[in-house]
C-alpha cells in the first residue's frame, strides 16, 4: 500500500450526494451550495491499496481510503464521490476571487474541498455558487484527478492532416490537422492514457453510418465523455449554431452506437490546439482537448506540465470555452426526437457543407 497527502478545507458532514452508485453522477451535488465561514484546514492522507498512485471511489476500488483528524482522533473512510464546484473565496482582508473547487465526499458523509488557487491564501470564507461537474469518474492522484472519459479517441483512428490521413498515435506537435471551422491548424500537443475497462472507461463504438450517411466512414471508438459533432438544420433552429457537441455516452442506444464490453485495456489519445476545435476522426467530426481546469486535472502529469508551459509561452485562446454549444438533457432528447420524427440524420452532409461554405465566404469577404 502507498500513501500520499494533500491539504483541504473541511466543509462538514452531509447526507449522501451520490445516492445512485450505478452511474457516474452525484445526483444531489447542488444540495451543499452556499457559504461556509467555519474554515477548518485538514490534511488528508490517501491510502492507496493497490499501489497505482490513485485513490479510487467505492465504485472502482472499495479498499482505498482516506485518513484524517478533525480534532477528536483519527478517522478513516472510503471515497464515495468527486464533484467540481464553481465558487468564491473571501480572503482574510475581505477581498474575493473566483475559483473551481475540487470536492470529495467520503462514505461517512464528510466533505472536503481543495483548489490550487488557495495556496498561500488566508481564507475567511468560501462560497460554492454552482456545480461545474458532478459526473466525475471518481479517482485521482497526488496532483491530478483522473477521468479517462476526457476527450479521447482510441489508437488506430485516422485523422486527416496536410499530408494525408495519419493514425492518431503517430501524430506529432507541429502537424497541421484539418479542423471543421478553422482549416488546417498546428497540433500543439498529443498524449495518451491507458486504462482498464469499466462502465466509466469502456469505449463507445459508432458503427459506419450511425450518425448520418457514411458518418462515420468506418467504425470509430471514443471515450464516454468525448463529445461528437452533430450538424443539422434542426440543431441550428434550436440554438442558432449549425453544429453542436454531444457526449458520446448520451448517444448509446441509438442504432449502431454501443458501449464496448471487453476485458482488454484501452488506450485513448487527446489532441490540443490553441483553441477548442472539431477534428475529423474516421470520417466524422469530434472535439479536440478542451483546455479547462477540470479537463487539465484529468490528464496525466506529463501532459499537464506541457500544457502549463504552452499557456505561458503561447497565445492559447478561449480557455475553457467550447467551440460549439453542448446539447444534453431535455434539449438533447428534443433534438434526437425531432430528427427521428422527421427521418433526418444527426449529421446532415448537405447542411455541414453549406455551413463550411458560408464560413469560408465570410472569411474571404
Image (spheres, grey):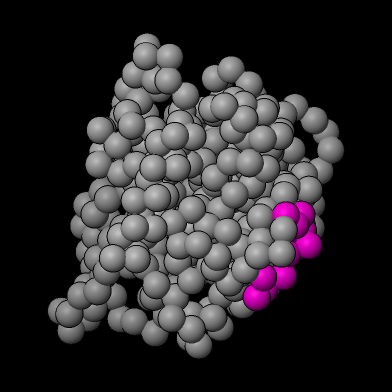
* Residue drawn at (72%, 58%) of the image: 164
Residue 124 coordinates in the image, percent (x, y): 23, 73
User: Is residue 184 or residue 86 the one in the foreground?
Assistant: 184
The answer to whether residue 83 is seen in the rendering is yes
The answer to whether residue 20 is seen in the rendering is no
Q: Is residue 68 left or right of residue 328?
A: right
Q: Is residue 365 above or below residue 128?
A: below
Does the magenta segment cover residue 270? no
User: Is residue 123 or residue 280 the one in the foreground?
Assistant: 280
- Res 86 → quadrant: bottom left
Please give the range of residues in magenta: 165-175
Residue 360 coordinates in the image, percent (x, y): 39, 58
Residue 290 coordinates in the image, percent (x, y): 48, 59
* Residue drawn at (61%, 77%) of the image: 305
Residue 89 coordinates in the image, percent (x, y): 26, 70
* Residue drawn at (76%, 54%) of the image: 167
Amino acid at each position: 500500500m502507498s500513501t500520499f497527502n494533500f491539504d483541504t478545507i473541511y466543509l462538514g458532514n452531509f447526507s449522501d450526494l451520490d445516492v445512485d452508485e450505478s452511474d457516474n453522477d452525484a445526483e444531489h451535488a447542488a444540495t451543499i451550495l452556499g457559504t461556509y465561514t467555519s474554515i477548518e484546514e485538514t490534511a488528508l492522507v490517501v491510502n492507496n491499496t493497490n499501489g497505482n498512485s490513485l485513490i479510487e471511489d467505492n465504485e472502482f476500488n472499495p479498499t482505498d481510503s482516506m485518513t484524517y483528524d478533525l480534532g477528536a482522533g483519527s478517522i478513516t473512510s472510503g471515497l464515495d464521490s468527486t464533484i467540481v464546484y464553481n465558487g468564491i473565496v473571501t480572503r482574510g482582508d475581505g477581498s474575493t476571487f473566483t475559483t473551481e473547487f475540487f470536492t470529495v465526499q467520503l462514505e461517512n458523509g464528510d466533505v472536503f474541498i481543495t483548489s490550487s488557487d488557495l495556496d498561500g491564501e488566508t481564507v475567511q470564507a468560501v462560497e460554492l455558487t454552482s456545480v461545474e461537474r458532478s459526473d466525475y469518474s471518481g479517482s485521482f492522484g497526488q496532483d491530478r484527478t483522473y477521468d479517462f472519459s476526457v476527450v479521447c479517441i482510441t489508437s488506430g483512428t485516422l485523422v486527416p492532416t496536410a499530408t494525408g490521413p495519419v493514425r492518431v498515435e503517430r501524430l506529432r506537435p507541429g502537424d497541421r490537422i484539418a479542423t471543421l471551422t478553422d482549416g488546417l491548424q498546428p497540433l500543439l500537443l498529443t498524449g495518451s492514457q491507458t486504462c482498464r475497462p469499466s462502465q466509466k472507461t469502456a469505449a463507445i463504438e459508432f458503427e459506419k453510418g450511425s450518425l448520418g450517411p457514411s458518418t462515420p466512414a468506418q467504425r470509430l471508438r471514443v471515450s464516454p465523455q468525448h463529445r461528437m459533432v452533430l450538424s443539422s438544420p434542426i440543431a441550428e433552429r434550436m440554438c442558432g449554431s449549425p453544429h453542436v457537441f454531444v457526449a458520446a455516452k448520451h448517444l448509446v442506444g441509438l442504432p449502431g452506437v454501443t458501449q464496448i464490453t471487453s476485458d482488454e485495456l484501452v488506450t485513448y489519445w487527446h489532441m490540443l490546439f490553441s483553441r477548442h476545435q472539431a477534428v475529423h476522426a474516421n470520417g466524422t467530426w469530434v472535439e479536440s482537448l478542451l483546455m479547462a481546469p477540470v479537463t487539465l486535472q484529468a490528464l496525466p502529469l506529463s501532459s499537464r506540465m506541457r500544457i502549463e508551459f504552452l499557456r505561458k509561452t503561447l497565445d492559447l485562446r478561449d480557455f475553457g470555452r467550447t467551440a460549439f454549444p453542448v446539447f444534453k438533457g431535455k434539449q438533447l432528447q428534443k433534438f434526437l426526437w425531432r430528427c427521428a420524427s422527421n427521418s433526418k440524420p444527426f449529421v446532415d452532409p448537405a447542411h455541414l457543407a453549406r455551413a463550411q461554405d458560408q464560413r469560408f465566404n465570410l472569411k474571404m469577404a
